[in-house]
Image (tube, rainbow, N blue to C red):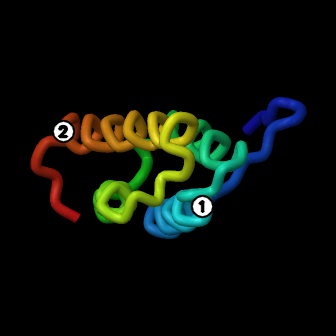
Amino acid sequence: MRQEPGTIRLEVDEQDFGTICVCALRYSMGRQTYMPTLVRDFIRPLLPKICGKSLQVMISDCEEQARCGNYGHPDIDKPGWIEWHRELLAEKERRGHEQY
């Protein structure tokens, strides 16, 4: 398979990939830096590849952060996390009643 210059090709188990994405999101939650946007932008196009269990964990983590008020700055960071939560719920809805 031909690889484009400047790209990285990885083969990762679906479950492990989802776990790594969950860890990255958890690390970035509450941080008032570029990190949350970078992590969400990395994962966003890959959401269809995230296993159902990891998707549900991401949704639960967002809901927990909302309850705790730990989205970072309310005017700068919080809107991005609220939108991310909506995107995760939309992906779950798109999948229907997929079990994990």
Tag 2: amino acid: Glu
Q: Is residue 100 above or below residue 49?
A: below
Circle 2/circle 1 CB separation < 8 Å: no
Closer to us: 22 or 63: 63
Q: Amino acid at mark 1?
A: Ala
Q: Quadrant of the C terminus?
A: bottom left
Q: CA distance from mark 2 to mark 1?
A: 23 Å
Q: Residue at x 49, y 68 (%)?
A: 19
**Residue 87: image tag:** none
Q: Position of residue 95 (x, y in %)?
A: 21, 41
Q: How packed is label 2: few (under 14 Cα within 10 Å), some, or many (20 or more)?
A: few
Residue appearing at x 78%, y 34% in the figure: 2
Q: Position of residue 79 (x, y in %)?
A: 45, 35
Quarter occupied by the N terminus: top right
59 shown above or below 44: below
Query: In the orientation shown, which residue stands out farthest toward the front?
Result: 74
2 on left or right of 76? right
> How many discs appear?
2
In the rendered image, the residue lying farthest to the top is 4
Q: In terms of secondary structure, where does tag 1 sit?
A: helix
Q: Nearer the viewer, mark 2 or mark 1?
A: 1
Q: Is residue 10 above or below residue 96?
A: below
Q: Residues within 10 Å of mark 1 (few under 14, many from 20)?
A: some
- Whether residue 59 is visible: yes
Q: Which residue is mark 2?
A: 93
Q: Position of residue 18 (x, y in %)?
A: 47, 61
In this rendered view, identify the residue nearer to me: 1 or 77: 77
Mark 1 = which residue? 24
